[in-house]
Image (cartoon, coloured by chain):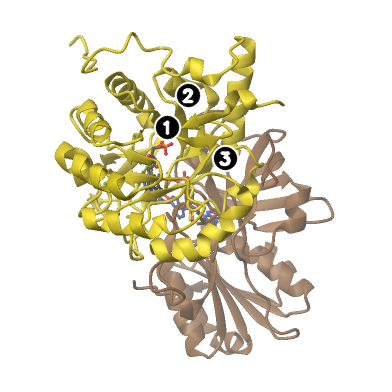
Amino acid sequence: MHDSSLEMTLSGIRLNNPILSASGPFGYGLEYLPLMNKGDLGALVVTGTTFEPRPGNPPPRIHETPAGMLNAVGLENCGVEQFAKEILPKLAEYNLPIIVNIAGKTIDEYIKIVEYLEKVPNIAGYELNISCPNVEQGGMAFGTDPDIAYTLTERVKQISTKPVIVKLSPNVTDITVIAQAAEAAGADCISLVNTFLAMAIDIEKQRPVLGNVVGGLSGPAIRPIALRMVWQAASAVDIPIIGMGGIDSWESALEFILAGATAVAVGTAFFTNPGIAQEIKQGLQAYMEKNMIDSLEKLVGAALPQKTVGGCIGTDD
Amino acid sequence: MTLPIIHLCEVLINREVKPGFYELRLHAPMLAKSAAPGQFAMLQCAAGKSTDPLLRRPLSFSNVCKKTGSIVFLYQVKGKGTHLLSRISEGDYLDVMGPLGTGFKLPKPGTPIAVIGCGIGVAPLIYMADYGRKHGHDVYAFIAARSKDSLLGADTLTASCACVYTATDDGSHGVKGNITDLLDEAAGTLALCKTTYICGPWKAMAVSAEKCLGLGLACQVSLESIMACGIGACLGCTCKTTRHIHYTRVCTEGPVFQAEEVLFDA
Ligand SMILES: Cc1cc2nc3c(=O)[nH]c(=O)nc-3n(C[C@H](O)[C@H](O)[C@H](O)COP(=O)(O)OP(=O)(O)OC[C@H]3O[C@@H](n4cnc5c(N)ncnc54)[C@H](O)[C@@H]3O)c2cc1C
Ligand SMILES: Cc1cc2nc3c(=O)[nH]c(=O)nc-3n(C[C@H](O)[C@H](O)[C@H](O)COP(=O)(O)O)c2cc1C
Ligand code: FES
């Protein structure tokens, strides 16, 4: 099938299609990519990368909930150096744009990681994870304070030669405030949502289920809220948006696109269906052919009313 | 949409063998050919596009028949996923992802081996015992459960084992006691087995492994962990071993480990 209709540019990154891996569930891609066809994924967003290796949280780290799951992996990763030296070369054969999700405890750590990666070839862009709920410092704290989000984004932009995506936390009262802070600081793109802070309790042990007490909720359970937030953010900023949160079909991917996402990312759905990227791709193509739409761009934000200044969408109650 | 790792398999048999325990036999020629003892598969328990339950469920291969192209799982109904599985009828199709993980390793030819299992932990050992015998090993089985109603494999294992020792908490089958009592009781035979294969609840596995290592026997354990991806990507299934300073993925580096590598108390 001819798929030029899904080709696109996201903040300067050329993509074969708008389907990205969400950072984390897909690891470094080394497990899923060999199972997939070339061209199924538009870009690879690798798991959260810190400067030093991180052990992550004690088990149990995952717990299933209705139509969703909690995770408290806690950013286990091998650190930026090992990623660049050992993992990145193995990804070359897939010929995909690679976006590195960066997680720091402090602004200086983010800067150190970007400085390191600036010297490494074959990286298409950075995604600043200011929204991880599973670490004590940094992570979500950056994502809930617009001033810190602004400063962090601005400082990274000063040293980065690559597109900078800021990944927003949904654990805020008003997503538009942070979205606008990131845009004002020069972010090339925003992605949302990360997981919702959540928990479960074991009624036999009368203790929290997760080793870390709280974790992040992902999967179809969060989709309507994630969609609402993408819609609100799209109404509030002009930079492109990567929409995610519970996407598990081409129909749900399309909802995010219609709400204003230029690209979409899939995480949890890979666990059940490693072939999900291809299904979304083919579904979108069939939809476009059926409706005689020649470019996906025409669908981006098509459900939005005229963008309003300030962009805050209220509810009736 | 078919990935090489996903198999749509016809259900040949799905029957309750003991109260709450089921045997599931699937027509799966590719898996029958490739699945090694100790490996597992992730089964889609939700029907169609249902998101309840969301995740696949890991089950160990309990046997394979290359000739007929069928595979067998033995499972205990625990919660939602296994309950739904128990409702599936013959002729239905199941979405099975596998084979996954690193399985058991055979010792030097000719040496006797032992399989040691508690409750549903016997499932992968049935395949291992069969495989061991086919490779010329004398196999001894030591199996334990709460009562004869939850004792699995006592009959099946007689086909592949030189002797099957059993224990139940209530004494309704074999020795009255738990797996440790059984291993003590049959210590003479156990000591002849140069390599042991253990699967069961965490604590039972830890004490059994300690006993085997104490006797100077090589010992492989099959661990359980909650899994999301089953292929090493999500880092949800980790445990502590001596292999890494940090955590080890049960789904890819295991589920089978050398007992001395596993930090049972961590
Ligand atoms: C490698 C591997 C091989 C396995 N092989 C077998 C097998 O051959 N036969 C068999 O009956 N079971 C096996 N299990 C355990 C089986 O996967 C769980 O019992 C099953 O996932 C429970 O699903 P559920 O929806 O019925 O229960 P849930 O509603 O999900 O949970 C019910 C209870 O089971 C526990 N549980 C959930 N998932 C797991 C899990 N992955 N491992 C252990 N406990 C879990 C929960 O903590 C809870 O206490 C294996 C597990 C692993 C990791
Ligand atoms: C196991 C797991 C690990 C994750 N790790 C990260 C991470 O390292 N960095 C990050 O920005 N988001 C991480 N996320 C969040 C996802 O990228 C995504 O934002 C979220 O799961 C919602 O999408 P989904 O419902 O499609 O999974 C993780 C999610 C899961 C389930
Ligand atoms: S279950 Fe995902 S890494 Fe093991």
The vertical placement of B131 against A1, above or below, is: below
Question: Residue B167 location, x and y as percent?
Answer: 52, 71
| Identity, as a three-letter code, of the amino acid under mark 3 | Gln
Residue B15 seen in this snapshot: no
Query: Residue at coordinates 37% horizontally, 44% vertically from top-left?
Result: A127
Image vertical order of residue B202 relative to residue B187, above or below = above
Residue pointed to by mark 3: B44
Mark 3 or 1, which is nearer the eye?
1
Asked whether the residues under the numbered discs 2 and 1 touch, taking CB atoms below 8 Å apart as contact, a structural biologist would say: yes
Badge 2 crowding class, 10 Å Cα cut-off, few under 14, some 14 to 19, many 20 or more, is many
Distance, label 3 to label 2, CA atoms, is 21 Å
Q: What residue type is labelled 1?
A: Gly
Q: Name the residue under label 1.
A: A246
- Chain letter of the residue carrying label 2: A
Secondary structure of the residue carrying tag 1 is loop
Relative image position of residue A300 (x, y in whole percent): 45, 19
Residue drawn at 63 percent across, 11 percent down: A290
Chain for colour yellow: A
Q: Where is residue A250 in the image (x, y as percent from the top left)?
A: 54, 25
* Up-down relation of residue A160 to residue A40 (above or below): below
The residue shown at (59%, 79%) is B196
What residue would you read off at disc 2?
Answer: A252
Under mark 2, the amino acid is Ser
Tell which chain the image draws in brown: B
Question: Is the residue marked 1 within 8 Å of ligand 2, measured from its CB?
Answer: yes
Q: Earlier in the sequence, mark 2 or mark 1?
A: 1
